[in-house]
């Protein structure tokens, strides 16, 4: 409990660091909201016009003053207003987040349901043809960029079968589950393929390590059935690196799968932050990054707590 | 084994059902046009927005006084007629009495006056203001008449007024400060819903003075990847789409159910040299570069031949036969001699900047130019940049050379006064001006005789190519793709989608 409290106390400090970093970084990149809106036509502006636009975008004040204003708003739960959307940043993020969360969960489901059994299967048949097969597929999965898998799926379905999920909009699960699944399944497979490959490789190697441990040999020598040994004795310990990799990947996915959201035209968090950066919508970039950082910290904390559940020998926060 | 098979079968069936349900879901309205584009509008204020993607949306909602037809001739929009005074220092417009805003209120001269005053007010921060500086005063003698008094003769002013940046907005909205937050124009479509970078819903304006709109509305989806747009067209999820990438466009004719509209546009691909930097300040070096570049090869390699080699003037009525322009035939011997004469016989190194994906051919153009200029000893280092970073460097003139796609205009003066006059706003970008160019531009601005204007700008073009501050390469096409049941779309050289007002679905 003390550990949990300590971890929770670090949250505001990390968020403060992230907020300073993103606030400065986005303003250090050449080009500003004015050139993002007007492109080369920005060269036609008079100094007075430029000043008027800078005031409109809130970039006419010194950076410290801008940061102070924004931070004050954040403490009040106001992440600012997006100049592109003309709406509060928090509202836009919360509109986009369900899609991203669902996509991340579906991808993780695919990864665990496919990757974990595949890894265990390969570990129990080490150096056999089936092990080699799993390793080759996992290698392909890990080395194929998401956008290649996504584009191949789109091409194969549209050119080969004349079908394609509805693109450019998002139907929430609660509104029409079947339509929602239709929209999400291909992006989830695209992401899940690479994710499953990582899980398969990690679970295979972790399982191989655990299977050579003394306690597993002891269990076997006592005549315990093979399946029992694998699932009851070996798997829980082999799961720790799998949980780590899954947690990290899941954390990334909660930040939005930019390329996959672009290809499948899904209005998720990744696309939102990308567009905000390209259009120099500072408040939106800052809000999104802060939100993503918060999610990442929560996921990391949950991963740490999962270690304790999986291996009671692990005691969090007791020395180093 | 049997249980495994049935699990797989059920999973596969669910997947297929989900995809089919999603793919076959019914459109919002049978007579609504389903459309897709890659880039969305960045705002709704017609006076402020200059991005191509914004203009394409806003010209469906708003109207200027006049507009261009498919041959770039000026035709009525909100104004039904207009007349220049003999000294070209006054234009009088008569407004169309049927013209109404989408809230049913008539468009009056007070709205026109208020719109132009807003545009000219520096606080509005409209970049297009630069095109209207000759307007000294605006009078509205009656609700249907507007008189623009000019400080000097300004023939190209009328073409500038055809831009959506000179749209007429309701005076009441200007007073209320809601222009840009509420889209209220007099155009063929009303904007019902806009989710930036995601989708737009437009409905037909039943009161539109231009006549009956052929569809009930337009549902626009933003699909950021053009391969996905092609897939959506193939599967009939989309009726009509805007395509930017020539490589994707060339795949459309392979699809039996689709039609590709391919229209030459005014925008030009160019290699901008920076004559304020050594050794590009040397005329012979610039001319050597011009002679060493094989423009047709750049077009064929970077843009799969989709376009036409061009000189500076790309608008109908002024375009010259490019092959007659100096050094438009690759001449390596002459180029090497010019380099040697300038004292750069062994070449030099320079950096060329280009924007990622803007245009889609930018990187390929830079690579072809790199290999061509290597033949005369110029070692080009290619620096690819994110668009906004590129624009920042471009506006500061912070480059040795830049690969660019610059917008064209229907009038040569409006197109080049920003770069090649002594008072041009973008002198810092072109970094080149001489008395001949400036004087020809000033003559062209006040000349009202079309034949004489053509001669003036032909001389301007020839001189510009001779002094070679930039190497003009080619003009490309604007592409739209549509299902065969979409009828009546009329593309224009500005890449306008206003033709959607006459489209119907059979």
Image (tube, coloured by chain):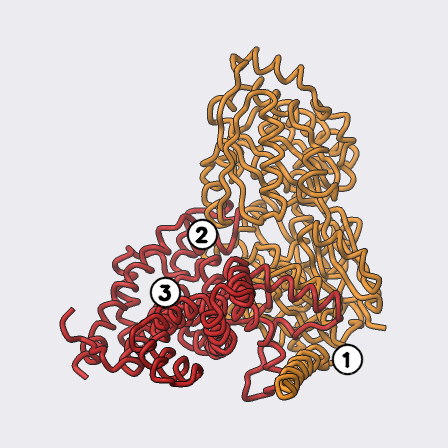
Chain colours: A red, B orange
Q: Which sits earlier in the primary sequence, circle 2 or circle 3?
A: 2
Quarter that holds the N terminus of chain B: bottom right
Mark 2, residue position: A49
Residue A35 image label: none
For the residue carrying disc 3, how many other residues have a C-alpha within 10 Å: few (<14), some (14-19), or many (20+)?
many
Question: Where in the figure is residue B95, as x and y percent of width and height?
Answer: 72, 63
**Which residue lies at the image location 59% right of the left edge and 82% below the top edge?**
A180
Q: Mark 2 lies on which chain?
A: A
Nearer to us in this view, B74 or A186: A186
Quarter that holds the C terminus of chain B: bottom right
Q: Would residue A291 be visible to someone looking at this image? A: no
Mark 3, residue position: A286
Question: Where in the figure is residue A39, as x and y percent of width and height?
Answer: 52, 50
Q: Which of marks 1 and 2 is in front?
A: 1
CB contact under 8 Å: marks 1 and 3 = no
* Corner quadrant of residue B228: bottom right
Q: State how many labels appear.
A: 3
Nearer to us in this view, A320 or B314: A320
């Amino acid at each position: 409990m003390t550990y949990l409290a300590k971890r929770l106390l670090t949250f505001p400090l990390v968020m403060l660091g992230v907020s300073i970093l993103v606030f400065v970084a986005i303003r250090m990149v050449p080009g500003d909201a004015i050139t993002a809106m007007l492109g080369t036509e920005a060269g036609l502006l008079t100094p007075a016009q430029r000043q008027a636009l800078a005031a409109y975008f809130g970039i006419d004040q010194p950076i410290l003053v801008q940061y102070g204003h924004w931070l004050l708003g954040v403490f009040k739960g106001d992440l600012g207003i997006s100049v592109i959307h003309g709406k509060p940043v928090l509202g836009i993020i919360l509109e986009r987040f369900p899609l991203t969360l669902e996509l991340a969960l579906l991808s993780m489901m695919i990864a665990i349901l496919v990757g974990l059994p595949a890894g265990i299967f390969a570990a129990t048949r080490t150096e056999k043809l089936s092990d080699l097969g799993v390793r080759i597929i996992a290698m392909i999965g890990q080395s194929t960029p998401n956008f290649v898998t996504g584009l191949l799926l789109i091409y194969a379905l549209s050119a080969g079968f004349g079908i394609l999920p509805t693109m450019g909009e998002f139907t929430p699960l609660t509104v029409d589950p079947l339509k929602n699944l239709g929209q999400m399944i291909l992006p989830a497979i695209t992401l899940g393929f690479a994710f499953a490959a990582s899980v398969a490789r990690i679970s295979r190697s972790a399982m191989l390590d655990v299977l050579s441990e003394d306690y597993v040999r002891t269990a076997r020598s006592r005549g315990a059935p093979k399946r029992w040994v694998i699932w009851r004795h070996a798997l829980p310990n082999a799961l720790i690196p799998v949980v780590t990799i899954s947690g990290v990947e899941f954390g990334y996915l909660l930040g939005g799968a930019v390329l996959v959201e672009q290809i499948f035209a899904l209005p998720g968090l990744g696309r939102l932050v990308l567009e905000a950066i390209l259009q120099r919508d500072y408040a939106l970039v800052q809000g999104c990054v802060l939100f993503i950082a918060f999610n990442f910290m929560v996921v990391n904390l949950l991963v740490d707590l999962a270690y304790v559940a999986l291996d009671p020998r692990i005691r969090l926060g007791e020395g180093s | 084994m049997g249980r495994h098979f049935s699990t797989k079968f059920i999973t596969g069936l669910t997947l297929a059902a989900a995809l089919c349900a999603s793919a076959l879901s019914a459109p919002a309205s049978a007579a609504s046009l389903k459309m897709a584009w890659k880039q969305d509008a960045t705002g709704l204020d017609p006076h402020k927005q200059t991005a191509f993607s914004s203009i394409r949306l806003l010209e469906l909602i708003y109207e200027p006084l006049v507009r261009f037809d498919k041959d770039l001739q000026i035709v009525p929009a909100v104004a039904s007629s207009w007349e220049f005074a003999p000294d070209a220092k006054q234009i009088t417009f008569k407004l169309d009495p049927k013209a109404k805003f989408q809230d049913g209120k008539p468009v009056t001269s007070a709205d026109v006056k208020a719109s132009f005053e807003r545009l000219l007010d520096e606080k509005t921060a409209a970049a297009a203001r630069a095109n209207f500086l000759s307007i000294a005063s605006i009078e509205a003698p009656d609700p249907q008449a507007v008189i623009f008094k000019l400080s000097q003769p300004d023939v190209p002013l009328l073409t500038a007024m055809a831009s959506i940046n000179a749209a007429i907005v309701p005076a009441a909205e200007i007073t209320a400060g809601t222009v840009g937050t509420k889209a209220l124009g007099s155009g063929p479509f009303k904007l019902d819903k806009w989710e930036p970078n995601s989708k737009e819903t437009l409905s037909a304006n039943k009161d539109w003075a231009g006549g009956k709109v052929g569809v009930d509305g337009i549902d626009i989806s933003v699909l950021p990847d053009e391969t996905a747009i092609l897939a959506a067209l193939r599967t009939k999820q989309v009726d009509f789409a805007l395509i930017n990438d020539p490589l994707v466009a060339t795949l459309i004719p392979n699809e039996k159910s689709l039609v590709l509209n391919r229209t030459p546009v005014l925008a030009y691909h160019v290699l901008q040299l920076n004559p304020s930097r050594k050794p590009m300040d040397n005329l012979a070096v610039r001319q050597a570069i011009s002679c060493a570049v094989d423009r047709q090869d750049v077009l064929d390699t970077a843009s799969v031949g989709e376009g036409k080699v061009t000189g500076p003037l790309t608008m109908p009525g002024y375009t010259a036969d490019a092959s007659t322009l100096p050094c438009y035939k690759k001449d390596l011997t002459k180029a090497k001699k010019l380099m040697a004469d300038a004292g750069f016989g062994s070449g030099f190194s320079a950096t060329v900047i280009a924007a990622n994906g803007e245009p889609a051919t930018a990187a390929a153009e830079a690579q072809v130019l790199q290999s061509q200029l290597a033949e005369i000893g110029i070692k080009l280092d290619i620096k690819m940049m994110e668009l906004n970073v590129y624009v920042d460097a471009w506006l500061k003139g912070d480059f040795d050379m830049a690969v660019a796609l610059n917008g064209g205009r229907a009038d040569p003066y409006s197109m080049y006064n920003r770069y090649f006059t002594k008072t041009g706003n973008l002198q810092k970008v072109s970094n080149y001006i001489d008395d001949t160019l400036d004087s020809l531009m000033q003559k062209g601005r006040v000349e009202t005789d079309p034949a004489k204007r053509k001669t003036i700008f032909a001389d301007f073009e020839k001189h510009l190519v001779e002094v070679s501050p930039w190497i003009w390469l080619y003009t490309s096409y604007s592409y739209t793709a549509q299902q065969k049941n979409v009828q009546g779309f009329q593309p224009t050289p500005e890449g306008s989608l206003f033709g959607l007002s006459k489209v119907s679905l059979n």
